[in-house]
Image (tube, rainbow, N blue to C red):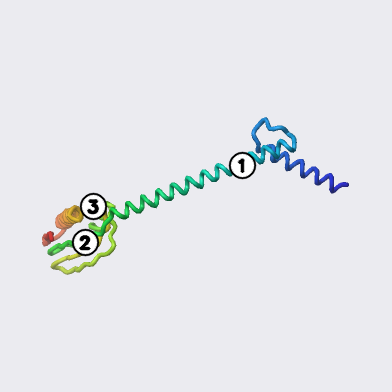
């Protein structure tokens, strides 16, 4: 007898919980609560399916956009040469910072340093034309050498290849 009373009490609480999440005005009868809950579940499932479709559309669009962007980026070979560099390391670092600002991605660098010359060849993924990138790099090298010369010894000359 006591267990039956507890079961009914738990059932009543469960219906009350269900009723509390249904729209206002829903009758407080078991059948009305169950019907309202069923409709709400179906509505939420419809929203879920719509969101899943939207996610798929956005992912497909994102993949296409990524593909277009990667198709328009080409690897270019950039060559630089600095005769009598003031600081080869500073020059290379400035070039790398410039390429980053330009949105270019450096995939490989091959360089030779000596007191007489700095030579480097870089593979760069970018949407810009190779000549434009190379010109920007040469300007950056010239500016870097000029700054370094104003601080130290005058012995550098930037050469264009």
The single residue placed furthest to the top in the displayed view is: 25
**Element carrying mark 2:** strand
Which quadrant does the C terminus fall into?
A: bottom left
Residue sitting nearer the eye, 34 or 99: 34
Residue sitting nearer the eye, 1 or 144: 1
The disc at residue 51 is none
The single residue placed furthest to the right in the displayed view is: 1
Instruction: Read off the residue under disc 2.
Output: 77
Rendered view: 137 above or below 28: below
Q: Is residue 145 left or right of residue 108?
A: left
Q: Residues within 10 Å of mark 3 (few under 14, many from 20)?
A: some
Q: Nearer the viewer, mark 3 or mark 1?
A: 1
Q: Quadrant of residue 8?
A: top right
Instruction: Read off the residue under disc 3.
Output: 128
Q: Is residue 45 left or right of residue 94?
A: right
Q: Quadrant of residue 138?
A: bottom left
Q: Earlier in the sequence, mark 3 or mark 1?
A: 1
Instruction: Read off the residue under disc 1.
Output: 42
Q: Residues within 10 Å of mark 1 (few under 14, many from 20)?
A: few
Residue 61 on image: x %, y %: 40, 48
Residue for point 42% across, 50% down: 60
Q: Earlier in the sequence, mark 1 or mark 2?
A: 1
Is residue 105 visible to the viewer in this orientation of the structure? Answer: yes
**Element carrying mark 3:** loop
Residue sitting nearer the eye, 72 or 110: 72
Are discs 1 and 2 less than 8 Å apart at CB? no
Residue for point 66% across, 41% down: 38
Q: Is residue 93 left or right of residue 11?
A: left
């Amino acid at each position: 007898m006591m267990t039956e009373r507890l079961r009914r009490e738990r059932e009543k609480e469960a219906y009350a919980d269900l009723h509390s999440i249904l729209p206002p005005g829903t009758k407080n009868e078991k059948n009305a609560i169950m019907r309202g809950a069923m409709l709400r579940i179906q509505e939420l499932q419809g929203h879920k399916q719509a969101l899943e479709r939207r996610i798929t559309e956005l992912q497909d669009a994102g993949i296409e956009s990524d593909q277009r962007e990667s198709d328009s980026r080409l690897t270019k070979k950039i060559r630089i040469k600095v005769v009598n560099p003031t600081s080869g390391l500073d020059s290379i670092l400035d070039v790398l910072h410039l390429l980053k600002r330009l949105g270019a991605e450096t995939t490989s660098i091959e360089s030779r340093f000596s007191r007489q010359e700095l030579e480097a060849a870089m593979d760069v993924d970018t949407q810009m034309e190779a000549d434009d990138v190379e010109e920007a790099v040469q300007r950056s090298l010239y500016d870097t050498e000029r700054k370094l010369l104003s601080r130290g010894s005058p012995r550098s000359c930037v050469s264009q290849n």
